[in-house]
Image (cartoon, helix red, strand yellow):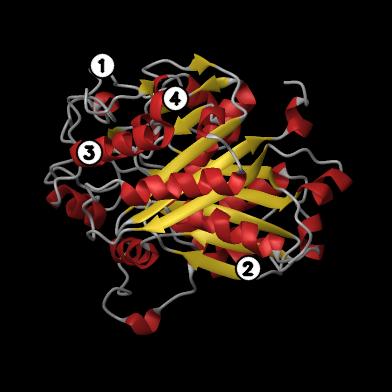
Amino acid sequence: MLAEHSIVITGVGAISALGRNFAEISASLLAGKSAIRPVTGFDASEHPCQIAGQLTMPECPSELDSSSYRHGFPLDQCAIWCGWQSLQDAGLWGKHRNLKVGLVLGVAAEAMSHWDTDYRRGGALIHDLSQSRPSTSSFVRNALQLRGPTMSIAAACASGNHALAQAQEWIGMGLVDICLAGACDMGVTPYSLASFGNLRALSRRNDAPAAALRPFDRDRDGMVLAEGGALFVLERSDLARARGKDGYAELAAVGTTSDGYHLVIPSPDPTYCIAAMRQALATAQVNPDEVDYVNAHATGTPVGDVCEARALNAVFGSYCDRIPVSSTKSMTGHLLGAAAAVEMLACLTAMCYGAIPPTINLEHPDPDCRLRHVANQAEERTVRIAMSNSLGFGGHNTSLLLRRSSERFGAAA
């Protein structure tokens, strides 16, 4: 292992139904905008849920090969867009070809996404696996001309946090100079809409899309699917300073546990969620009362929101009465495999803009979700330390801690 250095985020690339970059998405989050609309692109009239946060990918950036971008599936294009943007933001585009740049990409149900897209294009990939194509991470590596190791991670909603933890380890071990890490998902398809609909996991408020997703609200009736992703440039703080680049924030710690309770039902026992949060706090040497904001996983399901609220109360105790908590899924929708990455983006929004994105549609807080909610409107606040929880299907529990960089914001801020 190398001598310890903090790992900082120096580049951000993102896209969702709320915007095509970090600034646009941040503005939408702080304005309390909803990305949820009626589904287009395929006939959803027979589905119980007919709304989603769908994304149309932009044209290929001029710096990239348009042929490979155009022939990629939407998931490939989403990840390429985010990776290209984050390298640009970090001031490394072009220079990155002379560096050992790693890629850790959370993609969750990648194969199903590709099969569904190919089938709707008239292909037979789902019936003939001899037609298998490169993975999205390989597609991105080649499109961006990366020279370091590449890894795909599938850990459901927690994929992005696991990707960031792996990138942190690669950098600490000296395996890469810098690393691109995060997650993307383009999962609004007939298959996913039917699957989650049949599980009764999706809201059925088709007549009021923007008001459908209601985390922590007494009247919540499920989540709403969405698309997009975020990739981040991670590097050692001393190397970033040496090239004159300030970090957005330090990736302080990622706590991870697994309960394996059920394939799709969250465990009613918050023990392992509690353990993930406490692990992150202990690793970062942060006391519970030092956390300025928690971005909750809260998906708007009756069981999951209550379980997470209980876990937060167990970890933060009486501090829960003053630590602001919000679920930005109420605006973005649930981006499935990309959820953790986009919610870390929301934490960076709070740090960069001095305001906490709200939980919209929170009209009647559930008394079983006793928290210090940021309801319906953004709240001005200096955020130095933020926690982001992502709890995935299959019992993947993760808790990520960010510490604001004094270089970017000023040591006295």
**Residue designated by label 4:** 319
Along the line of sight, which residue is nearer the eye, 249 or 79? 249
- Label 2 to label 3: alpha-carbon separation: 39 Å
**Residue designated by label 2:** 142
**Residue designated by label 1:** 363
x, y (%) of residue 135?
A: 48, 70
Along the line of sight, which residue is nearer the eye, 9 or 128? 9
Seen in the picture, residue 185 relative to 215 is either above or below; the reply is below
Q: Identify residue type, mark 1.
A: Glu
At x 14% / y 45%, what residue is drawn? 200
Closer to viewer: mark 1 or mark 4:
4
Q: Identify residue type, mark 4.
A: Tyr
Q: Earlier in the sequence, mark 2 or mark 4?
A: 2
> What crowding class fits label 1: few (fewer than 14 Cα within 10 Å), some (14-19), or many (20 or more)?
some
x, y (%) of residue 44?
A: 19, 45
Q: Determine the image quadrant of residue 201.
A: top left
At x 58% / y 49%, what residue is drawn? 283
Q: Determine the image quadrant of residue 32.
A: top left
**Residue designated by label 3:** 301
Q: Earlier in the sequence, mark 1 or mark 3?
A: 3
> What crowding class fits label 4: few (fewer than 14 Cα within 10 Å), some (14-19), or many (20 or more)?
some
Seen in the picture, residue 162 relative to 251 is either above or below; the reply is below
> Quadrant location of the N terminus?
bottom right
Asked if residue 229 can be seen in this view, the reply is no
Mark 2 and mark 4 in contact? Answer it, CB < 8 Å. Answer: no
> What crowding class fits label 2: few (fewer than 14 Cα within 10 Å), some (14-19), or many (20 or more)?
few
